[in-house]
Amino acid sequence: MGRALLDITMSLDGFVTGPGADLSHGLGIGGEPLHDWIVGEQEDADRMALDRTMAGIGAVLMGRRTFDLIDGPHGWSADDFRGERPAIFVLTSSPPSRVRLDGWFTFVTDGIGPALKLAQDAAGAQDVMIMGGGHLCRQYLYAGLVDELRVHVAPIVLGDGTPLFERTTLDPIRLVPRETTSTRHATHLTYDVPDREQR
Amino acid sequence: MGRALLDITMSLDGFVTGPGADLSHGLGIGGEPLHDWIVGEQEDADRMALDRTMAGIGAVLMGRRTFDLIDGPHGWSADDFRGERPAIFVLTSSPPSRVRLDGWFTFVTDGIGPALKLAQDAAGAQDVMIMGGGHLCRQYLYAGLVDELRVHVAPIVLGDGTPLFERTTLDPIRLVPRETTSTRHATHLTYDVPDREQR
């Protein structure tokens, strides 16, 4: 069974979007620099990080707002996939009545555990990527269901927006740094997340 | 005039201590791994980051709780300084009636701007280091008074504690990455903070 990877970009102060994120401003007010490492003039380490983001991914998990963006007018198209398109699972309490990218998505309403199970079954030997938003990511992280954490830290203090983390009474999570690369657009951090027993 | 450097360690989720930090547990519950890069089995990049932390520093600025720790029973001693001890300025609304390290500290009660001015005068051509806690650091950062930001990101998600950042309605602060090194104990990030006009 493949691993569960969490791969997300945040500001130094921990926001994955600026404030006021909506369908036409997915990254919120002032949040565009978060993705300079993806859409800007990439350095080699940015390209390598991006190549790795989708490498070996057999299924993707996302929350409802991330789906709304991706299925929205400024969202994804078939051209966004060089190789095979992974299975995409959307966690939501209320599946949408209409979908632009018909047939791309499977909607899951019974929680993060079952959704991960479905995604891992679909991915086979490949990995599952948890791609956002912040709320879904931290649910998986705090539940101990993430095997590898990739955080791209953009060089900006946003001050407000959608947080990746939040205060929690759970035990601290020790991470094992595996690789760090850095460019003028982002610091790409990769950590292994040990199983709870091993922490 | 020297620059104002902010140099602090935080968890990946932005806490500079765990919860319940007090005089006998300066790093709070579960917060000890924050300082593994300082007191643990250091790698070369940890040693270099630590050497640089105090290099060329002519004065230090700290908040009241940081002073309480440093002047407390588990705090600093003269042995902690290989070279000359920098001038130390403590921002507080109520200076303490007794000080263990007599003569080490100057207490400033009229705000972060005047305190920085005093520290810069004392430092001469050398730099001023803003060393904590989180509240003082973000006041200086958000006020646009920091020239260089050094954040040591420890590989841990603490979940609770003293935050370095907080939500603010101020404009985002673009940073210019200058150097990143990484060990199993910490990722050492160094950013220039451009003047507001240049952001």
Image (cartoon, coloured by chain):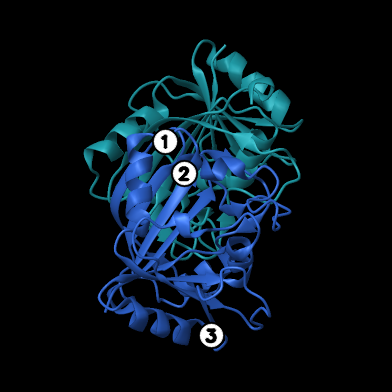
Chain colours: A blue, B cyan
The residue carrying mark 1 is: A42
Quadrant in the rendering for residue B121 = top right
Which percent across, then down, holds residue A149? 38, 61
Q: CA distance from mark 2 to mark 1?
A: 7 Å
The mark nearer the N terminus, 3 or 1, is: 1
Residue at 70% from the left image edge and 46% from the top image edge: A29
Chain bearing tag 3 is: A
Amino acid tagged 3: Gly
Which percent across, then down, holds residue B132? 55, 41
Residue B98 in sight from this viewpoint: no
SS for dot 3: loop
Question: Where residue A111 is drawn, which disc sits there?
Answer: 3
Q: CA distance from mark 3 to mark 1?
A: 37 Å
Residue at 36% from the left image edge and 55% from the top image edge: A82
Nearer mark to the viewer, of 3 and 2: 2
Amino acid tagged 1: Gln
